Amino acid sequence: MTSHAPEFPVLYTFRRCPYAMRARLAVRYSGAAVELREVDLKHVPASLTQASAKETVPVLVLPDGKVLDESWDILLWALRRNDPDCWLGEDECHLVPADQLIEMNDYSFKDDLDHYKYADRYPEHPAEEYRSRGEEFLQELEELLTTQPYLLGDRISLADIGVFPFIRQFAFVDKDWFDQTAYQHLQRWLDGFLQSDLFASVMVRHPIWKPGDAPVMQGV
């Protein structure tokens, strides 16, 4: 049987993964037409394994066969196709400062987040110790948001979209604790995204994809 290249890009995703969430937010915002494939990360489909040896999400497979398996690359792919509210900034001026924040988020903060969220797996220290380490990044964001509504200025940028899913995850480890902290500007910023139509649109539940299923399309 002859296999046919997909007509639309295929985005493999997992609803709760912050990296996949980042990618879905950018793709949805850009209006790009894609086929969404929700996967069970404990039973990765063969087509995902064939596309990316990482066997994790997000992975975007383009109709020409090109594969993007880093959330940041998928975000840039989407915004460079269509960026109506200028998340990249004029002449992509937000790209460098956003990349700096994303690097801090994806490495040191993500490590602290994982230790905090799954503290029972890391009994060397109590959860509060890991949370305290993560707060260093929260404090940096709080300072940025003290004088402006978003991380890089008066408008949403790719920095906000890149960081938001991880701050959301950190906050919801113990939401009562987070809500009583002094991070008032960060709380406002987070709530704004949580209550947005864009966030609601990318958190719709879809069944786990299986070969032969009718495609779940977005942006068509």
Image: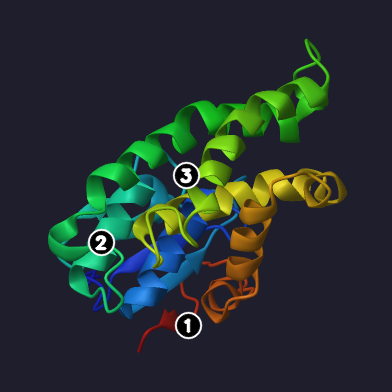
The residue that label 2 is drawn on is: 88
Q: Position of residue 87 (x, y in %)?
A: 31, 65
**Relative to 52, 136 lies left or right:** right
* Residue plotted at (58% across, 45% down): 142
The residue that label 3 is drawn on is: 56
Type of amino acid under label 1:
Ala
Question: Is residue 95 placed above or below 117 in the rendered structure?
Answer: below
Type of amino acid under label 3:
Thr
Q: Secondary structure at mark 2?
A: loop
Which of the two labelled residues, at mark 1 and mark 2, occupies the earlier sequence position? 2
Q: Position of residue 98 (x, y in %)?
A: 33, 47
* Residue plotted at (53% across, 37% down): 140
Q: Quadrant of the N terminus?
A: bottom left
**Relative to 32, 192 lies left or right:** right
Q: Secondary structure at mark 3?
A: loop
**Relative to 75, 175 lies left or right:** right
The residue that label 1 is drawn on is: 214
Which class describes the residues within 10 Å of circle 3: few (<14), some (14-19), or many (20+)? many
Type of amino acid under label 2:
Leu
What is the quadrant of residue 161 in the picture?
A: bottom left
Which of the two labelled residues, at mark 3 and mark 1, occupies the earlier sequence position? 3
Mark nearer the viewer, 3 or 2:
2
Q: Quadrant of the C terminus?
A: bottom left
Question: Is residue 15 placed above or below 19 in the rendered structure?
Answer: below
What is the quadrant of residue 177 in the picture?
A: top right
Farthest bottom residue in view: 220
What is the quadrant of residue 11 in the picture?
A: bottom left
3D distance between C-alphas at marks 3 and 2: 26 Å
